[in-house]
Amino acid sequence: MKSRYAVTILVFIVAAAALGGIYLRLQQNSEEPAEDSESSTVDSARAEARNTAAATAFATGVAVPVEGAPVKRGTFVLWVNAEGQATALRRAPLHAQVAGPVIEVPVREGDMVPAGAVIARIDPAEYELARKEAQGALEQAEASYQDLTLGDDAIVDPDLLEARQAQARIRSGLAGAEARLEQAVYNVEKTLIRAPYAGRVANLVVDVGTRLSANDSVAAIVDLSSVDVDVQVLESEIATLDVGREATVNFTAFPGEEFRAAVVTVNPVVDPVTHVGRATVRLRNPGARILPGMHANVRIAGRLFEDRISVPKEAIVERSRREVVFVFEPDSEGSSTGRAKWRYVTTGLENEDAVEVVPSEDTDMLEEGEIVLVGGHTTLTHDALVRLSEPEEESGGAS
């Protein structure tokens, strides 16, 4: 009996020891993350200290490469943005004016042709015969007229002489013969279908052997020396546009390339349903690279504000929720090395490229010609040593 009691006590002791070991293991694991967290915080603080030290060491002796741009004074432009498609400056559809088979097509679609160039030639044989007949009929009428007016040179009364000659023209059929010859000559000339002005051949639909009737389509001549872009403009902006305003055009077909243009028309009517108006800008097209139908993004000068100070948008940075610019102060005149001096500024109007800087009692004002930093400056501190690494470039805004 005593043996069984001893065994039971021993089992309880072993179980208690096992449970105690498990508890201590769990307690140790629960304390490890706290140690890791504390270690992580320490490491972060150390890393920050190292970075600060490195930044301080860098700032004390090495000039940071930056880019600069001048402060501008001039007209500040609020641009109107719109989309449209290119259209040819002029487009002339060509049609047959006389009937007959085509015997020559000396051009191909897309060819550049001068004014007067032959696009297609209709067989003139039939019309040449008609011209010769008309010429013979006119000669007969002239002979009859001479017979009817023979001896009229003796008439002294000018009114009587004029009346007799008029009657002779009618009786001889001279007037009708002259008209028929003119028509015959005209028909011969119209067997040659010519370009009315210099341009490119488009929509050519005839070839040698094609039988044409009067008014049948032959081709079109498009003048691509300049192109127009019609754009739809919101009614709130159409009133700010005027003929002659500058514009820039970017075509999807030529990414990254900008074309200068000008407003040539502003439609005075606004669509009452869509509430948009229409304006047209025109641009030169050397080499006829821009083709009708190409999609375009257009920017037109809208509201203009005279005599404003502005800087590129990239010049504005934020410090403690305030707007700041860094002004470059060279070590000596003409030097590319100097100090970045920050100035708090108050901004006004803004467009896609530039920001206006306006006077304020608690901020600084900039002067025309000062150099503000526009690249490599976002992490600078006041009075940092910098070096202009790029030529000073002007930016949009005031002009």
Image (tube, rainbow, N blue to C red):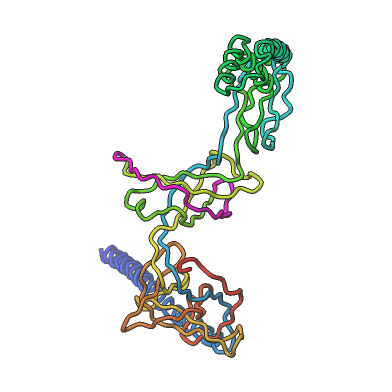
Front position in the image: 7 or 201: 201
The answer to whether 215 appears left or right of 247 in the picture is right
**Front residue (pair 171, 372):** 171
Which residue lies at the image location 60% right of the left edge and 42% below the top edge?
Answer: 224
Q: Position of residue 187 (x, y in %)?
A: 65, 18
Which stretch did the figure color magenta? 251-273
Image quadrant assignment for residue 359: bottom left
Q: Is residue 239 above or below residue 378?
A: above
Query: Considering only vertical position in the picture, is 232 above or below 217?
Result: below
Q: Nearer the viewer, residue 376 or 76?
A: 76
Res 228 visible: yes
Rendering coords of residue 147 (x, y %): 69, 10
Image side of residue 111 versus residue 236, left or right:
right
Residue drawn at (48%, 68%) of the image: 399
Seen at 53% across and 51% down, the residue is: 250
Instruction: Please tell me which residue is depicted at 50% across the width and 45% down the height of the picture.
Output: 229
Residue 260 falls within the magenta-colored stretch? yes
Give the image location of residue 1, x and y in percent. Answer: 25, 63
Q: Quadrant of residue 222?
A: top right
